[in-house]
Amino acid sequence: MSLKGHNVLITGASMGIGRAIALAFAAEGANLALLARSHDKLQKVADGVRSGSTTTGTEVRVHIYVADVRDPSAIKKATSAAANDLGIDVASGGTFDILVNNAGLALGAPAPFWKQDISSDIGTMINTNILGFMAAAHAMLNEGGMANAKRGTILNVTSTTGLEIPPFPGEAVYHASKACQEGFTNALRTELVGTNVRVLALRPGVVQGHFHEQRVGYDESEYDGFMDGIEALVAEDVASAAKWMVGTREGVSIKALDVVPSSQRSLPVFDREWAERNS
C-alpha cells in the first residue's frame, strides 16, 4: 500500500527514530504532523522533509507542533490543530491515517532502582513512556478521528526490552514501562474489535545514537563498551521496518515485529565479534 497522500502524526519526531520515520514516510508522499518538545529540532526535521520533497518532486505537507506527551491536554490540542491544518474534518468522519507513537526515553542507568530519583528519573520515565504513550493513542482515537471513522493504523514503537529482563543495571523502570506498552498495545487492539483500526508494535533492539547514549550513561567509555563489536542498527533501519508494517493492505496486520542487529542474538546475548568478522 502506498503512503502517498496519507496523513501521519509522529510523536518524538525531532530526532533519532522519529526523525528517520518522518523522512522515510515523506519520501513515500505522506503528509506529516510532527510532535516533540523542541521547536528548533522539529524545524530542522521539517526543513529536511521539504528539501527532500523538492529534490524528488514529491509534494507533501509538513506541520510541526511543540508539545510534551506528559501533558495529555497539550497532546489533545496539538492533535486537533494538526487535523485542522491537514484538512481532516473529524466531525464529518475524517481521520488521520497513521499514528506513529514513538516518544519515549530511558533515564537513571546504571544506578539501581532504589538509587534513582523518584521524580526526575522514575517519574519522568513513567509519565513519558506510559502516560504519554497512552495520551497520544487516546488523542488520536478521539481528536484524530480514528474511533469515529473506525479506521487507521496505530504503530506503537515499543522495545525488545519489554519482553525480556534486561541484563543491564538500572533498567527496572524502563523495562516495566516497555512491558506496559506491550500489554496496552495488545489490549487496545482487542478493544477496537468492530473497527478497521490496526494496532501494531514495532520493537527495536540496539540502535546507535542519543537514546542509547542516554540509556547507558553519558560516560563515553560506558557507551563505547556497550556498542563494542556489535554493529548496532541505525535509525533508518527502524524506519524501513515501520514503513513496511504500515504499508501492508488494511486486511493485514503485522501485529508485532522485532527489528534488531543480527549481532544481538537475544536481549542479553551479543556477538561481540560481528563487526570484525564482517568488516
Image (cartoon, rainbow, N blue to C red):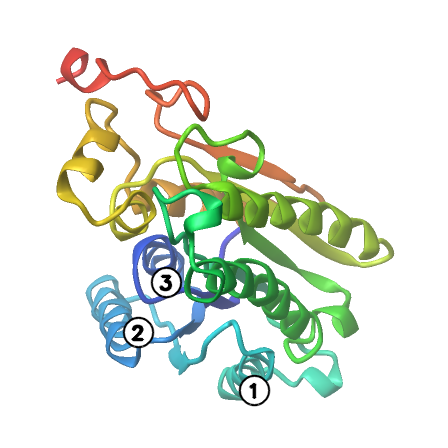
Given this view, does label 1 or label 3 mark the residue nearer the observer? 1
Q: Which residue is mark 3?
A: 26
At 74% from the left and 79% from the top, the residue drawn is 93
- In the image, 158 versus 127, the foreground residue is 127
Tag 2 or tag 1, which sits nearer the N-term?
A: 2
- In the image, 103 versus 240, the foreground residue is 103
**Callout 1 secondary element:** helix
- Relative to 118, say whether 229 is above or below: above
User: Where is residue 261 drawn, in percent x and y?
Assistant: 35, 28
Farthest-out residue, right? 194
Mark 3: amino acid: Ala
Q: Which residue is mark 2?
A: 42
At 26% from the left and 47% from the top, the residue drawn is 217
Tag 3 or tag 1, which sits nearer the N-term?
A: 3
User: Where is residue 121 drawn, in percent x and y?
Assistant: 43, 59
- Relative to 13, say whether 78 is above or below: below
Mark 2 closeness class: few <14, some 14–19, many ≥20 residues within 10 Å: many
Image quarter of residue 232: top left
Relative placement, left or right, of 113 versus 46 is: right
Image quarter of residue 30: bottom left
- In the image, 275 versus 5, the foreground residue is 275
**Callout 2 secondary element:** helix
At 64% from the left and 48% from the top, the residue drawn is 180
Mark 3 closeness class: few <14, some 14–19, many ≥20 residues within 10 Å: many
Image quarter of residue 28: bottom left
